[in-house]
Amino acid sequence: MGKKDNGKASKGDSDKNRDSRKKLDDELYEETLFELQAELVKLQQWVVAKGERIIIVFEGRDAAGKGGVIKRITERVSPRIFRVVALPAPTDREKTQLYLQRYIAHFPAAGEIVLFDRSWYNRAGVERVMDFCTEDEYRHFLHGCPRFEQGLIDEGIRLFKYWFEISDEVQRKRMQARINDPRKTWKLSPMDLKSRRRWYDYSRARDDMFAATDTAQAPWYVVMADDKRRARLNCITHLLNQIPYETVDEKKVELAERDKKKAFDDSATLASRNIVPERF
């Protein structure tokens, strides 16, 4: 995938410069996404062949586009290798477990990549801002999280953490679009609406989370996501550049011919079945 990068934005990459850029050309976007998705297939084959275990955490502002990048990562690979975990609110039973217990249950085995659409960092974000946890629980989490993640790395798991950041105005527009579009209303939860009012509380929670958990072993990578398409391409490119995967040699696939020894008119047997009307 070319040169490795250090995950840092250049000094000249200011908000003003991002806002003034032209819309990403459709053809360029599709061609680049095609190439990246082909690389993700190579990554998949390497992960299976080497028995790798990878965890990718996606966090960020509400409506920042986390789901969009996860969709583009997973739409051309096997769901048995790339597993998406998006946990609902904990049940009464889960609330009595160790906090990290229900997340650990979804961790990868050899040859798997797990993408967390929200993760154990709920405690540092929504739980803290909305008072769903006590101050002691919150402090305990921030203190223990780096050690927990270091333990994962020591066990050979590759851990990547992405934070998707958008501006106040872009979040407002995206949330309003969800209200107006019947296909998107399911994306807008009561918690999302509350997050609009508490923008600065979430900003402080984000900064405190970074201060405690942005470590050399498990750093946070911030994706500037006002432009969804650029954010997708930037995130996937960055992820691929962090993993030393190689092309795995595989036998050439050859399409077999049908065995006609037991041939019959198999389409005729469908005539008496309930066929969906062809209206298009």
Image (tube, rainbow, N blue to C red):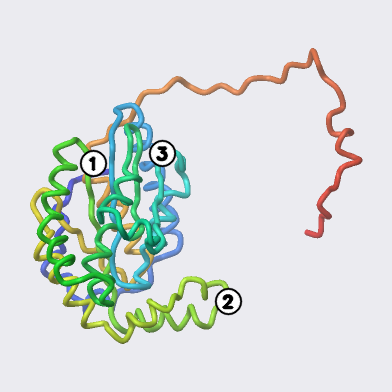
Q: Amino acid at mark 3?
A: Ile
The circle drawn on residue 81 is 3
Closer to the chain start, of discs 3 and 2, is 3
Query: What amino acid type is highlighted by mark number 1?
Result: Ile
Count the marks: 3
Residue topped by disc 1: 243
- Three-letter code for the amino acid on which mark 2 is drawn: Pro
**Left of 77 or right of it: where is 111?**
left
Q: Which residue is mark 2?
A: 182
| Nearest-to-viewer mark from 2 and 1 | 2
Q: Quadrant of the N terminus?
A: top left
Q: Secondary structure at mark 1?
A: loop
Foreground pick, 163 / 149: 149
Q: Are marks 2 and 1 in contact (CB under 8 Å)?
A: no
Judge the density around disc 3: few (<14), some (14-19), many (≥20) Cα neighbours within 10 Å: some
Which element type, helix, strand or loop, lies under badge 2? loop
Q: Quadrant of the C terminus?
A: bottom right
As measured in the structure, the alpha-carbon distance from the residue carrying label 3 to the one carrying label 1 is 16 Å
* Mark 1 neighbour density, 10 Å: few (under 14) some (14–19) many (20 or more): few
| Figure check: 252 above or below 240 | above
Name the residue rendered at 28%, 72% in the picture: 132
Q: Nearer the viewer, residue 274 or 266?
A: 274
Residue depicted at x 34% and y 45%: 105
